Amino acid sequence: DVREAARVLGAGAANLVGLLDIDRVLLGGRTVESAPETFVRGVQAVLDARARRTGDTAVPVRVASGGGLGVAEGAAQLVLAPMFGRGDA
């Protein structure tokens, strides 16, 4: 079920947010594109619950733009942001 997949993805995202101090989560790929709102809501719910438990600020979740390239662009931003700053253009 798609809602369960979104919840599991949210649990993984929450672990990464805690480990890597990530300030946003971008979702992409064919599976997410099949039900984007369901994935955003499911992942956001898990991240919001984590923020309530830890007292941290909730991390925003959105669907990456750019279709198939969105995932690669997001990964590149994570790698390059420490050197060049965030790419919020």
Image (tube, grey):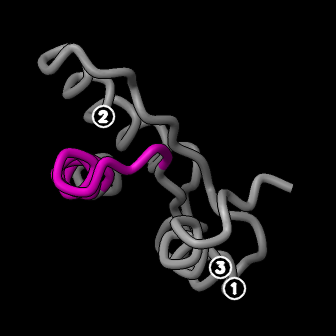
Question: Residue at the right extreme?
Answer: 89
Q: Which numbered marker is on residue 47? A: 2
The count of marks equals 3
Label 2, label 1: how many angstroms apart (C-alpha)? 24 Å
User: What's the residue type where badge 1 is placed?
Assistant: Leu
Say few, some or many: other residues with alpha carbon within 10 Å of mark 2 (under 14 / 14 to 19 / 20 or more).
Answer: many
Residue 70: which quarter of the image?
bottom right
- Picture coordinates of residue 11 (x, y %)? 18, 49
Q: Secondary structure at mark 3?
A: helix
Dot in front, 3 or 2:
3
The residue that mark 1 highlights is 69
- Residue 17 in the magenta stretch? The answer is yes
Mark 3 — residue? Answer: 73
**Numbered range of the magenta stretch:** 6-24
Q: Is residue 30 visible?
A: no
Q: Amino acid at mark 2?
A: Leu
Mark 3 or 2, nearer chain start: 2
Residue under the point 60% across and 67% down? 33
Quadrant of res 86: bottom right
Instruction: Decide: is 28 above or below 50.
Output: below
Q: Give the left or right position of residue 32, taking residue 54 as reference.
A: right
Q: Residues within 10 Å of mark 3 (few under 14, many from 20)?
A: some
Q: Earlier in the sequence, mark 2 or mark 1?
A: 2
* 3 and 1 marks in contact (CB < 8 Å): yes
